[in-house]
Amino acid sequence: MRTHPPVEVVTVDDQEIFRAVVRDVIEATPGFRAVGEASSGEEALRVVGELEPQLVLLDVRMPGMDGIETAERLRAAHPHTVVVLVSLAESADLPSSAGDCGAAALVRKQDFGPALLRSLWRAHGLDG
């Protein structure tokens, strides 16, 4: 049986507590590895450029450059990176540009867990 290297994940959120929760979920999910974090859109561009993860979990609402603009810039610079927006808000409550920024999906923070992480990667990951 051929095993794949773990999917490398960067989490971008201005709230340390959410980054810690996501880190724990990633580390508890076989086949995934947390490789980096950022607390702003600007920092995300630098971290993703340095680490080149396969998956970026990106908060929609952050001070400065929000997640929508960050997703657009990440997708332009790293077209093979899967970007998933995360938000406390329902998708209907987000700006319409959230659907046009190149993100593979939008998920609610309160739904995030190992099963969702695996299903996101199965649906949108490069390895299928």
Image (spheres, helix red, strand yellow):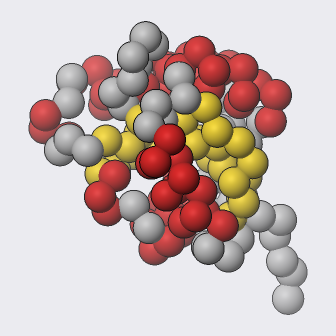
Residue most toward the top?
64
Image-quadrant location for residue 37: top right
Residue most toward the bottom?
1
Relative side of 74 to 117, left or right: right
Residue most toward the front?
17
Relative side of 114 to 46, left or right: left
Residue situated in front as seen by the camera: 123 or 45: 45
Residue 54 appears in the figure: no
Q: Residue at x 83, y 65 (%)?
A: 5
Q: Quadrant of the N terminus?
A: bottom right
Residue situated in front as seen by the camera: 116 or 38: 38
- Residue 25: where, in percent of width, then height? 54, 66
- Judge whether 119 appears above or below 39 on screen: below
Residue most toward the left?
92
- Judge whether 85 appears above or below 7 on screen: above
Q: Residue at x 59, y 15 (%)?
A: 42
Q: Residue at x 20, y 41 (%)?
A: 89
Image-quadrant location for residue 79: top right
Q: Number of marks in the image?
A: 0
